[in-house]
Image: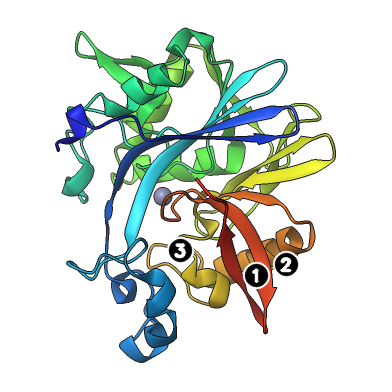
Amino acid sequence: MSATDAPPLIHRQTLGKLEITRIVEVDEPFLTPQQMFAEATPAALAPHLEWLLPKALCPTTGKLILPVQTYVIRTPHHVALVDTCIGNHKAFAGFKRWANREDDTWLRRLAAAGISPEQVDYVFCTHLHLDHCGWHTRLENGRWVPTFPNAQYLFAAEEFAYAEGRARSGEDPVFAQNVLPVIAAGRGVLVAQDFVLDDTLWLESTPGHTPGHVSVHLQSQGLQGVVTGDLIHSPLQCHHPEWNFIYDDNPALACRTRRAFLERHADANTLVLASHFPSPSIGHFVRRDQAFEYRYLAP
Ligand SMILES: [Zn+2]
């Protein structure tokens, strides 16, 4: 079945008065464990194969399965998106796999979840990598325009500066395609890494994968939730918080941030909305020995 005729891959969950919907854009084998984490040798992986196969580790390709997805949060007052996946027609010089897509599956899944682009009030972004801000914009008559015409797009200021620097050095077209058009349209707002929208949504500063990386905290009726972003990529890192992803900008800081995040949210029984954990992605961190494991909620 091609992506274009795929059924909606949507997953709903509530947290107090918040309604959470997972909108998946792609869900496919990505890289082998050792390509993602240098320490993931066959011997280090062996104790984990039983729970990895076949849903988290593709038995055919030997690659870890990695969804790219958006979390939609409906509060009593707002519709907010956290991250906007890859998008269509994007040029990525160094990462051709996701370049120049022409696939409206993500938009159709959003519509199937009952959300029109006009309804979105806030677009949060954990960090400005190509798989987290693609649908910030879409191409209209050869011009990039904000996909969500009525939304405020919130950018952590330090992440914005980092992405701007990468654009200036010619490293990364993401800023020009996904960020600048939002600013030009007057829809962008720079915020601190500990920005608080209200008593249901705020940012947690979680630097390391990128300098201005943030996680998005949810709260309702005394219950806590968090969208991780890329401070953690795989449930393997619950068992091995010291394993850094190859693209972590500052590995030592990423490792400290990950360990502290696991500690904090395991203790609080936080509902974890993991950005790249295999479907159904949502679950809890639980302490195990000197580290953690991941318990999925039933889809
Ligand atoms: Zn990512």
Work out which residue is located at the far front of the displayed protein and give it: 298
Asked whether disc 1 touches disc 3, contact meaning CB atoms under 8 Å apart, the reply is: no
Task: State the separation of the CA atoms marked 3 and 2.
Answer: 16 Å
Q: Is residue 256 above or below residue 193?
A: below
Earlier-in-chain disc, 1 versus 3:
3
At x 65%, y 46%, the residue is 226
- Residue occupied by mark 1: 259
Seen as rendered, the residue at the extreme right is 222
Q: Outermost residue toward the bottom? A: 43
* Label 2 residue SS: helix
Residue 122 drawn at (x, y percent) = 58, 21
Decide which of 256, 85 is in the foreground and name it: 85
In this view, the residue in front, 56 or 276, is: 56
Image position, residue 115 (x, y; %): 47, 15
* Mark 3 or mark 2: whose residue is earlier in sequence: 3
Query: Crowding at label 2, few (<14), some or many (≥20) Cα neighbours within 10 Å?
Result: some
| Residue named by callout 3 | 234
Residue neighbourhood size for the residue with mark 1, other residues' Cα within 10 Å, grouped as few (<14), some (14–19), many (≥20): some
Q: Is mark 1 within 8 Å of ligand 1?
A: no
Q: Residue at x 33, y 73 (%)?
A: 33
203 versus 38 height, above or below: above
Residues at marks 2 and 1, CA–CA distance in whole angstroms:
6 Å
Q: Is 132 on the left-hand or right-hand side of 289?
A: left
Identify which residue is drawn at 75% across, 56% down.
Answer: 269
The mark found on residue 263 in the picture is 2
Q: Amino acid at mark 3?
A: Ser
Image quarter in which the N terminus is found:
top left
Q: Nearer the viewer, mark 1 or mark 3?
A: 3
Q: Position of residue 5 (x, y in %)?
A: 19, 28
- Disc 3 element: loop
User: Separation of disc 1 and disc 3 at Cα?
Assistant: 14 Å
Do the residues bearing badges 2 and 1 touch, measured as CB atoms within 8 Å?
yes
